Image (cartoon, rainbow, N blue to C red):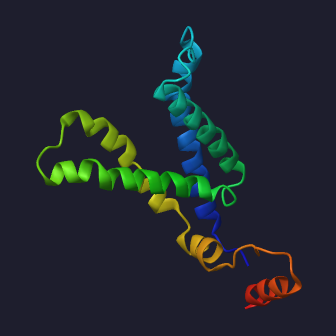
Amino acid sequence: MNEVSIYRIYALRAMYLLVVVGLALTMWPDVFTAEKPFANWGSAQTVQTSMMGAFWLLCALGIRYPLQMLPILMWELVWKTIWLLAVPLPLYLNGSFDDKLIPNVIAIGMVVLVYLVMPWSYVWQHFVKKPGTAWSNTKDSAEQTTEVAAK
């Protein structure tokens, strides 16, 4: 009955915990020790900090609800993979890779851990194969959704 093994659940919890601890050590000290952390509200840094703060909070929820918060890890997996394929890979292939990118490539390259802990069969069953929510409230659409879900 259990779709995801307990070991995979704990691996997911460890991944969420890694993100929570990592951001707690790297991001939050800068926010709390800065004299005026959001003094320049228009800067890209404040946007990034706010987004990472939201990501941090949602990953904290993921420790308790690992499967329900999978879309957060999926978002991380997608944006990091896109960045790795779109920025450093072409630079490396055309010989213009800048060594200043190495820390970002290493940090973002840790996305490989998400690939390893992701319960891919669960993702397939619940995010690809499972019918979506009906677009209307008609009896026909509700019956169709129920019939497809029963299969």
Q: From the image, which quarter does the N terminus lie in?
A: bottom right
Q: Give how far across and how far down residue 108 sits, in percent.
A: 38, 45
Instruction: Say which of 13 and 38 sits in front.
Output: 38
Q: Residue at x 13, y 52 (%)?
A: 94
Which quadrant of the figure has residue 140? bottom right
Image height of 105 relative to 43, above or below:
below
15 with respect to 83 (left or right): right
Q: From the image, which quarter does the C terminus lie in?
A: bottom right
Q: Residue at x 23, y 33 (%)?
A: 100
Q: Give how far across and how far down residue 110 sits, in percent.
A: 40, 48
Instruction: Say which of 45 and 4 sits in front.
Output: 45
Q: Which residue is most to the left?
A: 95
Image height of 23 relative to 32, above or below:
below
46 with respect to 69 (left or right): left
105 with respect to 10 (left or right): left
Instruction: Say which of 141 and 13 sits in front.
Output: 141
Report the number of numbered marks.
0
Instruction: Say which of 140 and 1 sits in front.
Output: 140
Q: Residue at x 33, y 39 (%)?
A: 104
